[in-house]
Image (spheres, rainbow, N blue to C red):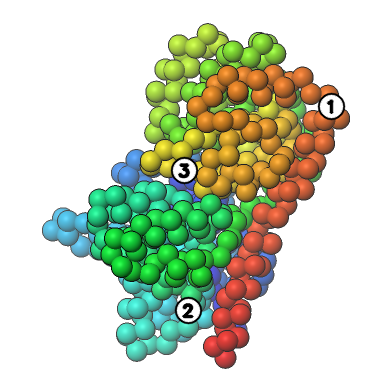
């Protein structure tokens, strides 16, 4: 019998760990026998209008045969002030849910993707057409920090209730880390205390943890000669640079890294490579230009998914000094797990949000907003013996293998299978 997986997400070319996670889950579904896999996402022009950081389209890797990316267009004209694209998204989901094909629908990000799926399921069931769909909703931290927390702070009960009820209406509720689950319960508690609701207990009992899915095969067993060749194309050499690779935003702590790198005595002959794009790119370029190490800082805005593992593997150290900000908190740290799989020098990071769950005890930890600690950590890494570096590399890789996409996908589908068994 045909079986379909539908994933609703901000997909490629958006620069976001969860767009990569969606790709990995889709590919895993094919390997596990799903014969129709669809990623339902936003039109490219809408992503550009929204100002989201985007990869150059030519650098986006193709999906395997059997995976269809759909970008439903807006519904209505200028007289529909808002919601035109949501209308197109929900409408397409209704069509997919009413064609009789058994479907698992997974949404990444509660707002607006889970609410769109919830609305579509309700509409589909009211049509009287055959509907066989089970839903998985995955919450990430920005769902809470950017939506629910703001609603609580501004006493907008209805908007918060809309997000949480859509989430809890899903058949399977997961969060990308224990930190994220704890954050959801914390904000739900504030809502309960103010309005007499019971969201905290419902969330605490319903939400499981499902770490982001990573394609480990992209990062394992990299050929040393290929690493050297890839680096040479960038004018780099193995262990000759410190690497930052992530979104260029205030919360990522790039300014602290620039200061720490400039102050490091052992990194004097090295390059700081800042790879990525993001909303603060212009400001960070200006900040780097004013640094005493300006001539040793290089920005790479065009790194694609195929090049990323080699940059990780060739770096003397990878640094992500992420910090909590009202608009964003690192809920897991997918990039840190990817780095661990690729090998190379140790990671230096903070324990912001769910980062500790991504690295365990395999990274050097610094406090947030502490460039001096970053400097000391860089110096410590560069002074390590080969044996100490290799031990950290091997332990980090072994820890990160739990996030392989097949393991994560199998655990998600096992939750759905248990529901099907109960229903039968």
In percent of width and height, residue 158 lies at 25, 63
Vertical relation: 9 (above or below) 294: below
Distance, label 3 to label 2, CA atoms, is 32 Å
Q: Which mark is residue 386?
A: 1
| Disc 3: which residue | 329
State left or right for residue 217 relative to residue 368: right
Question: CB atoms at circles 3 and 2 under 8 Å apart?
Answer: no
| Residue 269: quadrant of the picture | top right
Nearer to us of marks 3 and 2 is 3
Distance, label 2 to label 1, CA atoms, is 53 Å
| Residue 315: quadrant of the picture | top right
Distance, label 3 to label 1, CA atoms, is 34 Å
Look at the numbered disc 2 and give the secondary structure of its residue: strand
Q: Residue at x 57, y 86 (%)?
A: 422
| Disc 2: which residue | 133
Q: Residues within 10 Å of mark 3 (few under 14, many from 20)?
A: many
| Residue 370: quadrant of the picture | top right
Of labels 2 and 1, earlier in sequence is 2
Vertical relation: 353 (above or below) 180: above
Q: Residue at x 52, y 45 (%)?
A: 353
211 or 53: nearer the viewer: 211
In percent of width and height, residue 136 lies at 50, 69
Look at the numbered disc 1 and give the secondary structure of its residue: helix
Nearer to us of marks 3 and 1 is 3
In percent of width and height, residue 324 lies at 46, 38
Q: Residue furthest top?
A: 292
């Amino acid at each position: 019998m045909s079986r379909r997986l539908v994933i609703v997400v901000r997909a490629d070319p958006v620069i976001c760990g969860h767009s990569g996670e969606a790709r990995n889950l889709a590919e895993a579904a094919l390997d596990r026998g799903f014969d129709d896999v669809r990623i339902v996402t936003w039109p490219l022009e809408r992503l550009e209008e929204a100002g989201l950081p985007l990869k150059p389209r030519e650098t986006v890797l193709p999906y395997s045969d059997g995976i269809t990316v759909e970008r439903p267009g807006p519904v209505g004209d200028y007289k529909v002030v808002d919601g035109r694209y949501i209308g197109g998204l929900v409408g397409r989901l209704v069509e997919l849910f009413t064609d009789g094909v058994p479907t698992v629908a997974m949404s990444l990000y509660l707002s607006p993707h889970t609410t769109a799926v919830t609305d579509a399921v309700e509409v589909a069931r009211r049509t009287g057409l055959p509907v066989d769909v089970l839903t998985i909703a995955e919450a990430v931290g920005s769902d809470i920090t950017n939506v629910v927390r703001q609603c609580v702070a501004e006493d907008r009960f209805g908007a918060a209730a809309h997000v949480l009820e859509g989430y809890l209406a899903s058949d399977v509720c997961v969060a990308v880390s224990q930190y994220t689950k704890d954050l959801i319960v914390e904000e739900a508690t504030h809502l309960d205390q103010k309005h007499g609701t019971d969201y905290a207990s419902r969330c605490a009992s319903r939400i499981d943890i499902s770490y982001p899915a990573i394609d480990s095969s992209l990062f394992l067993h990299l050929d040393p000669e290929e690493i050297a060749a890839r680096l040479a194309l960038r004018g780099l050499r193995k262990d000759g640079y410190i690497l930052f690779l992530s979104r260029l935003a205030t919360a990522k702590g790039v300014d602290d890294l620039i200061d720490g790198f400039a102050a490091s005595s052992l990194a004097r002959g090295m390059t700081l490579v800042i790879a990525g794009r993001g909303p603060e790119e212009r400001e960070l370029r200006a900040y780097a230009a004013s640094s005493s190490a300006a001539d040793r800082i290089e920005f790479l805005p065009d790194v694609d998914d195929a090049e990323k593992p080699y940059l990780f593997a060739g770096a003397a150290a990878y640094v992500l000094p992420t910090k909590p900000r009202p608009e964003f908190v690192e809920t897991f740290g997918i990039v840190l797990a990817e780095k661990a799989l690729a090998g190379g020098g140790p990671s230096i990071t903070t324990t912001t949000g769910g980062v500790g769950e991504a690295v365990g005890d395999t990274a050097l930890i610094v406090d947030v907003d502490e460039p001096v600690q970053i400097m000391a950590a860089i110096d410590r890494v560069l002074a390590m013996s080969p044996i100490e570096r290799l031990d950290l590399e091997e332990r980090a890789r072994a820890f990160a293998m739990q996030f392989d996409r097949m393991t994560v996908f199998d655990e998600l589908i096992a939750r759905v299978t248990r529901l099907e068994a109960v229903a039968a």
